[in-house]
Amino acid sequence: MKRFNPIPVAGPDPDFPFLNENRRYSFCDPVKSEHKSVIAWGGNLSPGMLLSAYEQGLFPWYSEGEPIIWHSPDPRFVIYPETLHISASMKKVLNRKQFNIVLDTDFPAVIKECSKMKRPGQEGTWIVEDMITAYSVMFRLGWAHSAEAYFNGELAGGCYGIRLGNLFFGESMFSLKSNASKAAFLTLARFLFNDGVSLIDCQQHTRHMESLGGVDISRKEFIAILGQAMALRRSGETDDLDRRGSWKGFNYELH
C-alpha cells in the first residue's frame, strides 16, 4: 500500500488509496513519538483510514488549506464513569426535561452546527467540508453517533463521536441555547456508561469538559487502555453491534 505523500497536499490526498471499512492502515506507534501531538500527515478520510486512526489512538485535526494532520495528544483528556460530573443544576435541567434528548436522529445537522461554532483561541473551523462528508459517511455506516437536544421542537444543541466497542471517541459539540450541549452530552454519556462504555475520549483538555469530569492521563496509558479494548472487540467479548445504529434501551431519566 502507498505510504503518505512526503510532499504535503491540502486536504485528502487524491492519490492515496480509498480504504473501505474492512481495510486498515498501520500508523507509526504514538507511544514512540517524541512529538506531543502530531504523529503523521497526509492520506485521506476514507472509512478504513478513520477506523485505523481511532483503533491506534489517533484522530484527524486540521484546517482549510492544510494537509490532514493526525494527532495523538500527550496527555490525553478522558472521562471515566466514576469521574463524570453532573452538577445539581444540570440534574434539574435534565429531570425537568427542559430539552427533548434523542440519539442519531439528525447527525448532518449536528455536525454542521458544530462546524459553525466559534471557539476560544481558534480561527475558522477544523470541521471542514471534507470532514463533514467523511463523518457523515461514518454515520451512514453505523460507526458515528450523535445526540440531539431539542427545545420547543427546534434543535438547540448536540454532540457527536465514534463508538468502537466499549470506548467512545467524542469529537465536537454545539449549543444554541444555554445548557443544550451539556444536556445532550451528559445524557449520551450516562447512556454510554450504562451500556458498557468504560471511557469517553475528549482528546484535549478544555475547561468545559473538565467541568463535566474530564481528567488528564498519559498518552502511554491511553494507548494501553485502547489496546485492551480493541483486543476485546477482536475476540468478540464485547458487543460492537452498537456501531450499526441499534441503540436499544435509551433512557432519558437521570437521577
Image: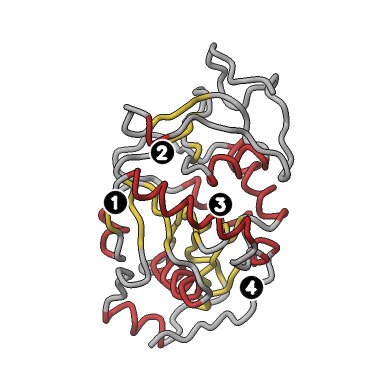
Q: Residue at x 51, y 72 (%)?
A: 196
Q: Nearer the viewer, mark 2 or mark 3?
A: 2
Q: Which mark is residue 72?
A: 2
Viewer-closest of 144 and 200: 200
Residue 147, percent from left and from top? 54, 66
List the residue tagged with mark 4. 247
Q: Nearer the viewer, mark 1 or mark 4?
A: 1
Mark 2 vs mark 3, CA separation in Å: 22 Å
- Is 74 displayed left or right of 227 in the figure? left
Amino acid type at image mark 2 = Ser
At mark 2, the secondary structure is loop
| Label 3 environment density (alpha carbons within 10 Å; few <14, some 14–19, many ≥20) | many
Mark 3 vs mark 4, CA separation in Å: 20 Å
The image shows residue 54, relative to residue 107, as above or below, that is above
Question: Which sits earlier in the primary sequence, circle 2 or circle 3?
Answer: 2
At mark 1, the secondary structure is strand
List the residue tagged with mark 3. 111
Q: Residue at x 53, y 72 (%)?
A: 150
At mark 4, the secondary structure is loop
Mark 2 vs mark 4, CA separation in Å: 28 Å
